[in-house]
Amino acid sequence: MFSPEAMQKIRLICLKEDRADVVCVLHELGVIDLRKSQLPLSDDAPPSDFSEMNEALIKVEGALRILPKRQIKRSRRLTQTQIKEQLGSNADIDRIYALSNERQQLQEDIGLLNYAKKVATYFTGIDVDFGTLDSEVLSFRAAIAADKELSRLRKAERTQAISKSSEIVVRRHVGKNENLIFMAYKKGDEAIDTALKSIKFTELDLHAKYLDATPGDVTKRASKSADADTKRIGEIDQELSRISDSNYSKLSVLRESLEIEVKRGEASSVFKATDSTFALEGWIPKRRLDELRQAMHKASRNRFVLEELKTPHEELAPTLVKRPKFLKPFDYLVEFYSVPRSDEIDPTWIFIISFPIFYGIMVSDVGYGVASFILSWIIMKKTDPEGLMHNVAKIWRMSAIPAVIVGILSDQYFGFSLNHLFAPAFTGFSWFSDITTIIVLTIFFGIFQVCLGLLFGFVNELRHHQKKLAISKITGILTLVFGTIAVAGGFFHATSASLALDSAGIAVLMLLVTAALSGIEAAEITNLMTHPLSYARLMGFGLGSIIIAQLIDQGFTPHLGSGVMGIVIFVIYLVIFMLLHLLNMILSIFEGIVQGVRLNFVEFFSKFYKGSGVKYQPFEYKEVYTEK
């Protein structure tokens, strides 16, 4: 339960003539995590048609991205022969690319036409022909500048030695706070450039495509051409839609079939080969070894060798954990922190149990718990199923249930006590009258989880043959337990004075033993004292949220008064009441998530968890649109 699955590294040696069948069976079985073979042989070569299949896959994927999406009908996966037949006969793929390229060209052309029309609009009423703005003597420039920049430009004109053959024409207010500056000057007159550097402006390209006539003519031609291009784009979209109606499902099946063939071809990059054989290596769950042998008997007609390899201690097996699908988000979050090693205890089950409890205690309100459930459900609908936010939202939704349960037990409904309305005889607990009990329970929960972490550390160190470190974990537990008894008896009189004194002596002795066994564990003694106390934050944040909710209820619960003013006051109080509860709920939810994660990852994981494992990634495929 607390350990990843036992893995075995294997080596398969088969005949080259059986390679296609062997790779196909391994791919369908999906049990082996392939590794580069360490045999001193030549690297194997991919199948002869691998490049062709890979290029075809890229081409089909591109065509599908161009087409409008359609519903896909699942159908039988294509064989290599059928794939090549479809690629050879499907002229629609080339047509899709031709239409896409044409549409892209038209869109670029529309952009140029609109730019030409925009520039021409600025020059409306000015006697100029853009087609003649090309001279061996004069240069022409145009720019758009704000009102405040014009005075700076005029000042620069006066201070710069601008040639008399140069001219700056300003046309005011061609747009909101915009002015057109049109310049004609002798080539090489640097004074114009110097003057322009003193202001902020947006330059217009007077030599842009389609600027080849008077402003009026340019505007008419550009509008007419843009309309024609837009119409043609509409026709292209309609044709692509028709192609998609008849080909989208077919191309999706072709793509998936190609993906499978390409992945099988890529697998050869880790094989080794001789003239007549090939070898592959990888990791497989031990429980599936017999299943692999049976599959190989069928694929190679008993012409294979399967070796179970002994691996050096430093070679780490990949990590595989088996868990129900609805609990996979917890694996995702732990792996986001660090993938568990295959040779250490997997902490995820403790995280699965403890995090919802922590969240429930810190939120501890039926209303906030229901809101957590609804908000997390909304986030799940809006986010990528493979992303971090989606998986956190799944955990959040599961944790909302303990928040509702603890809220019922503590009689909290947005700060109100409502249990008496439907269960008068029910008595739960009170955050105020039972506060001492709550804080003691949270601290003892912390002691239990920290001790459990040290116990897991003991098991891990034994697995790594670190006996001294393993024993130091046990002495650390004894230091914490007897130290707690000593503090409880000496300061709070929870035990007899003699028991407290004896416990203090044992705690000091265990600390000295820990120091002798491991200086690192002895240096962590302060954490053994402070980490259990950190669990008191469960009480602190839970109580804080309840107090704030009740203060909001006392100060801003709306009451409907008489008259228009009474209704206005009611509405104002209602808005304030809802806003403050929303803010308190956001704070409570945020702290519940952050602190729940922190108590596990910092206080608990730090006692035993190394991480940095390698995730098990079998050579497999998942059929979405095809079937065998």
Image (tube, rainbow, N blue to C red):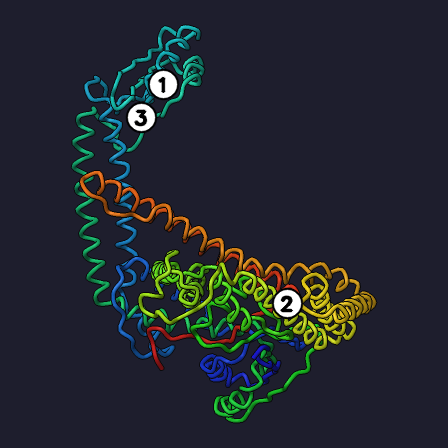
Per the model, the C-alpha gap separating discs 2 and 1 is 83 Å
The C terminus, quarter of image? bottom left
> Would residue 69 be found to the left or right of residue 231 on screen?
right
Label 1 or label 3, whichever comes before in sequence order: 1
Image coordinates of residue 624 in percent, x first then y, are: 35, 73
Q: Nearer the viewer, mark 2 or mark 1?
A: 2
Binning the other alpha carbons within 10 Å of mark 3 as few (below 14), some (14 to 19) or many (20 upward) gives: many
Residue 562: quarter of image: top left
In the displayed structure, 548 sits above or below 535; it is above
Q: Nearer the viewer, residue 131 or 440?
A: 440
Residue 251: quarter of image: bottom left
The N terminus, quarter of image? bottom right
Image coordinates of residue 205 in percent, x first then y, are: 33, 28
Mark linked to residue 139: 1
Per the model, the C-alpha gap separating discs 1 and 3 is 11 Å
Per the model, the C-alpha gap separating discs 3 and 2 is 78 Å
Mark linked to residue 34: none
Judging from the image, what secondary structure is the residue with disc 3 in? loop
Is disc 3 in contact with disc 2, using a CB cutoff of under 8 Å?
no
Judging from the image, what secondary structure is the residue with disc 2 in? helix
Give the residue type at disc 1. Answer: Ser
> According to the image, label 3 marks what residue?
206
Residue 9: quarter of image: bottom right
Label 2 or label 1, whichever comes before in sequence order: 1
In the displayed structure, 166 sits above or below 12; it is above
Q: Nearer the viewer, mark 1 or mark 3?
A: 3
Image coordinates of residue 182 in percent, x first then y, are: 31, 17
Is disc 1 in contact with disc 3, using a CB cutoff of under 8 Å?
no
Residue at 37% of width from left, 60% of height from top?
A: 417
Mark linked to residue 447: 2
Give the residue type at disc 3. Answer: Leu
